[in-house]
Image (tube, coloured by chain):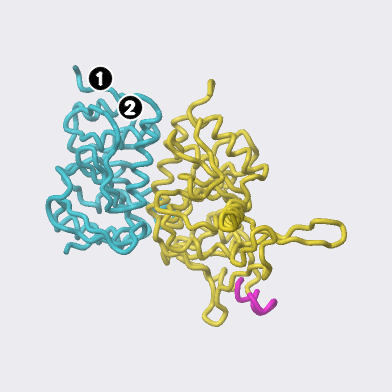
Amino acid sequence: MMDVRLPGFANNLESQRCFRAILQAMSHPGLIITLDINLTPPAPLSVATAAALLTLVDATVRVAMPENTGAGVDWLVFHTGARIAAAAEADFIVASAPPSLANLYPGTDEEPEAGATLILELPGFGCGPLFRLTGPGIESNIMLQAPLDAAFIADWRMNDALAPRGIDLLLCAGASIVGLPRSVTIEEV
Amino acid sequence: MQGYNFAYLDEQTKRMIRRAVLKAVAIPGHQVPFASREMPLPYGWGTGGIQLTAALIGPDDVLKVIDQGADDTTNAVSIRSFFARVAGVRTTTRTTEASLIQTRHRIPETPLRADQIIIYQVPMPDPLYRLEPSRPVARRLHAMVDYGAMHVKLYEDITRFGRVAVSYDHPVMVNQRYLMSPSPIPAFDNPKLHRSPALQLFGAGREKRIYAVPPFTSVVSLDFEDHEFNPQRAPQTCALCGSTTSYLDEMVIDDQGGRMFACSDTDFCEQQRQAQHDHAA
């Protein structure tokens, strides 16, 4: 079957369920949440990335998929009507190698909510360096093991310095997600 | 229900609200504009809260709605039955049983948990609106953390009345960054906002703003070192359950000047009375 014809959500309750999972992830940063969803996305999109896009994206939103020019883009546009844009102008950016956060739109001091959301595809959680997260949504601190490199962590520190502007991050691996809103501080331990 | 989408709002509207909610959570205390819809009740009756609830609610949720602490007032009853009808969800009056709590002007006495979300109905989201009527200017003040005018207002209260004359909607600083209206909850409830384990969402339908306080986030009521925040509670006991700690409503009960004080949180009051009854039995 052509990838573009792979199905989206079966009904509107699936997007409600995914939204609540994403909301939980964003309000409890660092918590690994597995989506209760049955979805066959076109390669190389993970289930979590595809579900997040179907939940949040529509024709009023600009999406950048710099690494993905084929089936993933066609599938997304077919199901959501998303407008494809360059990373610097996008509301949502989908990538597997973290782009430089400085190249994404962080919003303005008056409209920080216009800052982009980066959906970062990872091979998995529980591998790579161990990080300690602190910030709103976290009782004291929470540990997260994820394959994020030192360059990205340095980049994130720059993102912190932009507050309240900044980029929000949704990490996706398989059917699992971790939310890292801009308010979170990440330290390697 | 036939003829309506699940939970009344169309999916396009829900997505727009959901995106605004996620940004609100990422920027605690910042007011995010949203394209507020007309709802089947007038602005000012909780349309912001209802739109948030509609964008969040799912078939597994259990919904509680309170108005000034009470489950049985017109606003609470009609919003509860609205969602029972358009989403088919289970509703409750018990704080402990609810997964979603929509509230007008109170926070339940029973402490909230991390698996609960509380949604506040907000009439006027900008705490600066009485001091700075221009929206663009107020937005710039928020951007620059320029909250001097609010401190002057509180200071002037002290010079004129000897205390901060704000008994409800007492402004708070969220995450040491944004000045926020806690909605017209009594100042008595402000301490419950601080580091609450529950996600707190605020919706202003007429003013088209959504904002949020994530769990475990610092929420500090504005005060001065020599005039500390000092919320008031009527010094009476509840006439129904005898509580000396809950927030009380004063009710006129006859035309002879008779008055009664009772818990504003009807569920809390009922649980207290039930416990006393069980204890006595």
Residue B85, visible in the rendered structure: yes
Question: Chain A, which colour?
Answer: cyan
Q: Amino acid at mark 2?
A: Phe
Residue B134, visible in the rendered structure: no
Question: Real-space Cα distance between discs 2 and 1?
Answer: 12 Å
The secondary element bearing badge 2 is classed as loop
Question: In this figure, which residue is indicated by the disc labeled 2?
Answer: A9
Tag 2: Cα neighbours inside 10 Å, few (<14), some, or many (≥20)? some
**A109 w.r.t. B21: above or below:** below
The secondary element bearing badge 1 is classed as helix
| Displayed quadrant of residue B261 | bottom right
Number of callouts: 2
Q: Which of the chains is yellow? A: B
Check residue B132 for magenta coloring.
no
**B185 w.r.t. B117: above or below:** below
Specify the subunit that label 1 lies on.
Answer: A
| Displayed quadrant of residue A20 | top left
- Give residue B2's position: percent from left, percent from top: 53, 21
- Give residue B164's position: percent from left, percent from top: 63, 73
Question: In this figure, which residue is indicated by the disc labeled 1?
Answer: A5
Residue drawn 50% across the image and 31% down it: B87
Region rendered in magenta: B153-163
Same chain? Circles 2 and 1:
yes
Tag 1: Cα neighbours inside 10 Å, few (<14), some, or many (≥20)? some
Q: Amino acid at mark 1?
A: Arg
